[in-house]
Amino acid sequence: MPLREALILFGCLVVAIILHELCHGLAAAYFGDDTARRAGRLTLNPIPHIDPFGSIVLPAMGALAGLPIVGYAKPVPINPARLRHPRRDMLFVSLAGPASNLVLCVIAALTSRWLLHGGSSLAGAFDVAGPNLLLQIVFDFAVVNLLLGLFNLLPIPPLDGSAIIEPFLPREWLPTWYRFRPYGLLVVFALVFMIPGLITTIVSPFYDVLYRFVTG
């Protein structure tokens, strides 16, 4: 992967995961839990959100090595007991992150389409070591948010998609589910790095739709 492309993807991912976590905190605050606010996490300042390994080392390694680019920020602290309706509200809090990524993807896709078809002179004004730098940044931001939003909807803890199925699990399954949750991250890493084509297979149809929309 060219260095410029790797740096752009890395930067886009860091911004996307910070906004992802911020939206979790904002949703929790809306439903009555001010834990994230009291912890200073309801801010666009990236420093409180950055996890040194998950936000910098891991995505940088993926970008430079041509591996799947994944990353994470420090999870926003949430106390479900402070939510007005914990079981229901926690679902909305969990989905706020991937929903924000998909909304950002749509906004970036619309902007990319405009830059490509109507704003080429503006894109050219940011030409640094290659054509249409601004267009590349905005399109890559759309791609990264698409990937992050879909990836987090996988129903594997600690990914946000697990919150979709947890409320519907039979009560007798919950003890097994709670024992599995601490190991979910290992499953996620195994899927990403041991079966790298799996993520591509999942995302490719959505990427194709995004690409056709921007270039069509």
Image (spheres, grey):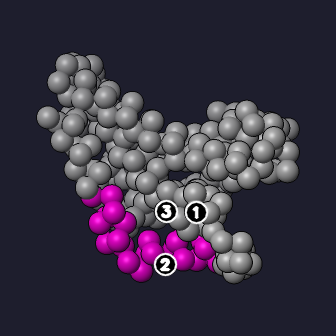
Q: Residues within 10 Å of mark 1 (few under 14, many from 20)?
A: few
Where does residue 211 sit, x and y in percent of width and height?
22, 43
The residue beneath circle 3 is 154
Q: Amino acid at mark 2?
A: Ala
Question: Marks 3 and 1, Cα distance to the nearest angstrom?
Answer: 10 Å
Residue 165 - label = 1
Residue 115 position (above or below residue 15): above
Q: Amino acid at mark 1?
A: Ile
In the image, residue 137 lies in the stretch drawn in magenta:
no
For the stretch drawn in magenta, what is the main secondary structure?
helix
Question: Marks 3 and 2, Cα distance to the nearest angstrom?
Answer: 14 Å
Can you tell which of label 3 and label 1 is closer to the viewer? 1
Magenta highlight range: 183-204
Residue 22 position (above or below residue 203): above
Question: Marks 1 and 2, Cα distance to the nearest angstrom?
Answer: 21 Å
In the image, residue 188 lies in the stretch drawn in magenta:
yes
**Nearest the eye: 8 or 36:** 36
Q: Residues within 10 Å of mark 2 (few under 14, many from 20)?
A: few
- Residue 24 seen by the camera: yes
How many callouts does the rendering have?
3
Residue for point 25% across, 25% down: 115
Disc with the residue nearer the chain's start (1 vs 2): 1
Identify the secondary structure beneath mark 1. helix
Can you tell which of label 1 and label 2 is closer to the viewer? 1
Residue for point 33% across, 58% down: 203
**In which quadrant is the N terminus drawn?**
bottom left
Disc with the residue nearer the chain's start (3 vs 1): 3
Where does residue 15 sit, x and y in percent of width and height?
52, 41
Q: Does residue 116 appear to the left or right of 77 in the view shown?
A: left
The residue beneath circle 2 is 190
**In which quadrant is the C terminus drawn?**
top left
Residue for point 32% across, 49% down: 5
